Amino acid sequence: MCASSSTPREVLILAGTRPEGVKTAPLIRRLLDDPRFTVRVADTGQQPGRVTEALAPFGLRPEVSLRPQRRSGSLAELAAALITGIDELLTHHRPAAVVVQGDTTTALAGGTAAFWRHVPVVHLEAGLRTNDLDRPFPEEANRAMLARIAALHLAPTRAARANLIGEGIRSSSIVVTGNTVVDALHDLIERGMAQAPDWVDTTRKLVVATVHRRENWGHGVAATVDGLRRLARACPDAQIVMVTHPNPQLSAEVTTGLAGVANARVTPPLPYPQMVGLLRAADLVVTDSGGLQEEAATLGVPLLVTRDTTERPEALTPGRGELVGTDPELLLSAGLRHLASGRTAVVGSPFGDGRASDRSVVALAGLLNVPARRVVQRRRTAATIG
């Protein structure tokens, strides 16, 4: 029997990594507040434990947790396990729509499984492109493939929308929402949760760095660490903080590369509110991460992107962000220039106004043909802590 237009529509939200947890959290909270929808949040287990960690500061938790078996660590093994697990989930819970976020293996696997089951796919953060299938790898291809099967494209910027239009995607299926990471940042800051670790020395210039992109593994990581080592030695009064990736091999490589540098600190991944607090305190961010480009630009922190191209060109405004690749000398010269010029006042974010999740709910309602919203009430479900 078909559901009536007044029956709450179930939305399945998939997340497998910490960034997916952070960026879906504002949308989950808005949907939980809307009686027209029911929400099921599934942690796919792509990064075990990281989704639960990411959702917790927002008062949320996954209702379902998958446990993909991994032995070789290959992308094919992960994708196969995720598609199988998600497909099984879809056989037990027939949602009205499946939301996937970004460019991860979880997003591609979840979108594929839902498409095969004729469940509408909603792509949150759609339309980002470098137009180079090798950079970032495999994320560029993941996004492009999702564009072919998504029923609704929630684009974070006008540029992302233009990318989709250029690929032949119907304009009626694209909604420019802003990026939900801005919503998440505003929420944490407003609630006073975005506090830097107590070991940060506020009397010194602070450089926050990360490195993890697959295309940078090997030479790129080593060259980036070399550039940071040179910057630390050229600015002995600055504090260089390298936040490592969960991958133990990458962590060991950067730890070894910065060993013996007195003003460099290597720290394991921080809880997200602490990471936001660290970024707020920073004078410079050096990263190959997509999410950190958005966060730094939103917080007004000068940014060096250690890649040759980026799918987030909005972060590269004059004087604020630039591509330096993995050339140690370019990193050093650009880093010295930004540290000398200092931070300027934040004037909005190129990634939205903090209402992306509201617009996303409106777009979802249109996709699923649910009635206009009249009553707002807080509903507790298994996706909510407490």
Image (cartoon, rainbow, N blue to C red):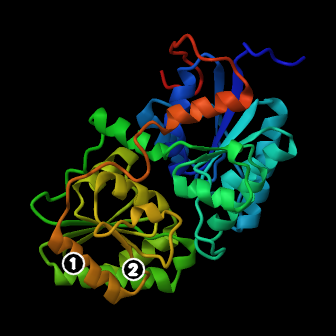
Quadrant (top left, top right, bottom left, bottom right) of the N terminus:
top right
Tell me the number on the disc at residue 61.
none
Between residue 330 and residue 161, name the one nearer to us.
161
Amino acid identity at mark 2: Val
Mark found first going from the N terminus, 1 or 2: 2
Task: Tell me the distance, in whole angstroms, between the alpha carbons under discs 1 and 2.
Answer: 13 Å
Q: How packed is label 2: few (under 14 Cα within 10 Å), some, or many (20 or more)?
A: many
As drawn, is 253 to the left or to the right of 360?
left
Q: Is residue 2 visible?
A: yes
- Residue 370 picture location, percent across and down: 70, 21
Q: How packed is label 1: few (under 14 Cα within 10 Å), some, or many (20 or more)?
A: few
Residue that carries the numbered disc 1 in the rendered image: 337
Between residue 202 and residue 108, name the one nearer to us.
108
- Rendered residue at 49%/39% (across/down): 356
Tell me the number on the disc at residue 324.
2
- Secondary element under disc 1, as helix, strand or loop, is helix
- Residue 235 picture location, percent across and down: 16, 79
As drawn, is 377 to the left or to the right of 236?
right
- Residue 114 picture location, percent across and down: 79, 43
Question: Up-down: is 201 above or below 351?
Answer: below
